[in-house]
Image (spheres, rainbow, N blue to C red):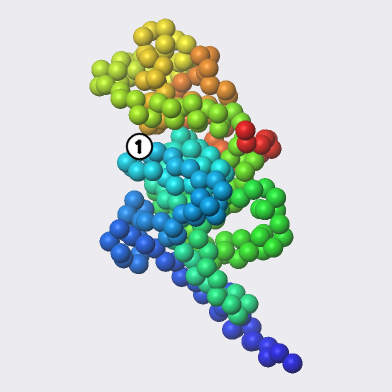
């Protein structure tokens, strides 16, 4: 007859965990997210089948995605999240469960101020599997003990339109240089009103690429949930549904349509 473990022992196994970070200085605890290195090497092309990189001009580096879902997720984060910092493959969570040692490496860590959110990117079918839901419930509890929130970011949410198309369009202009005179011109345009239509801005000599570059760096805002065009509103404050990833104080739980990636 197998030996039964006591309840305190079971509780200790399930609650004891450790986060292992790899920093540029080789320390075991993070100083800043921008000092972190990937906790796991990228899966090779031969193993993963799909890979890609996204240029992060804010931090002067490339973000390495291991799947098409991650690639699209990174683009959404870069274009829309207004995060203070984020890191792919940020750490390894070591923990014990049912007498066995386990290791978990999340896909993304996103930070707004003191709010730290760990994100697992998953296909909808995988996210809904009972065994995965059980595992993620355990991980959610363990991470909460370290001060982290945990989120499953499903493919249908990442690919919801028109946000994904709008994000890809805005990212085309992330390398555009905006001169001080152009910034001042737009500041004056918005000095008497919080919103203008994109058509109006273009008609009064504000280049489209300049406006969208300022949307990218969070000086101006658009409604990500309306298809971007000349009739779109441009604002000096966030507009439209504030659906994750957004700063936690502005985010609201709004259901998304289930639309597949194109």
Could you tell me how many numbered marks the image carries?
Answer: 1
Q: Residue 244: image x %, image y %?
A: 54, 41
Q: Is residue 158 left or right of residue 41?
A: right
Q: For mark 1, what is the residue?
A: 57
Q: Is residue 30 visible?
A: yes
- Residue displayed at 68% across by 88% down: 4
- Residue displayed at 30% across by 23% down: 178
Q: Is residue 220 visible?
A: no
Query: Residue most toward the top?
Result: 203
The one of 121 and 113 positioned closer to us in this rendering: 121
Q: Residue 68: image x %, image y %?
A: 56, 43
Q: Is residue 81 left or right of residue 183?
A: right
- Residue displayed at 64% across by 48% down: 123
- Residue displayed at 35% across by 65% down: 29
Q: Residue 36: image x %, image y %?
A: 36, 56
Query: Residue most toward the front?
Result: 46
Q: Residue 120: image x %, image y %?
A: 56, 53
Q: Is residue 124 left or right of residue 224?
A: right
């Amino acid at each position: 007859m197998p030996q039964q473990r006591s309840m305190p022992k079971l509780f200790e196994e399930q609650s004891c965990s450790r986060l292992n970070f790899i920093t540029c200085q080789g320390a075991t605890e993070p100083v800043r997210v921008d000092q972190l290195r990937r906790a796991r090497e990228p899966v090779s092309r031969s193993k993963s089948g799909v890979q890609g990189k996204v240029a992060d001009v804010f931090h002067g580096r490339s973000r390495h995605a291991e799947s098409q879902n991650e690639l699209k997720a990174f683009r959404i984060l870069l274009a829309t999240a207004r995060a203070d910092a984020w890191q792919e493959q940020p750490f390894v969570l070591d923990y014990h469960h049912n007498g066995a040692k386990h290791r978990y490496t999340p896909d993304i860590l996103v930070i707004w101020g003191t709010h730290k959110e760990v994100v697992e990117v998953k296909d909808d079918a995988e996210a809904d599997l009972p065994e995965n839901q059980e595992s993620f419930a355990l991980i959610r509890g363990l991470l909460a003990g370290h001060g982290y929130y945990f989120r499953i970011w499903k493919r249908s949410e990442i690919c919801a339109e028109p946000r994904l198309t709008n994000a890809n369009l805005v990212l085309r202009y992330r390398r555009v240089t905006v001169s001080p005179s152009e910034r001042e011109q737009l500041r004056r345009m918005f000095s008497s009103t919080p919103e203008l239509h994109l058509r109006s801005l273009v008609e009064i000599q504000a280049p489209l690429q300049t406006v969208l570059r300022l949307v990218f760096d969070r000086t101006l805002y658009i409604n990500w949930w309306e298809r971007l065009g000349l009739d779109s509103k441009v604002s000096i404050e966030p507009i439209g549904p504030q659906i994750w990833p957004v700063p936690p104080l502005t985010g609201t739980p709004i259901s998304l349509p289930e639309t597949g990636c194109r």
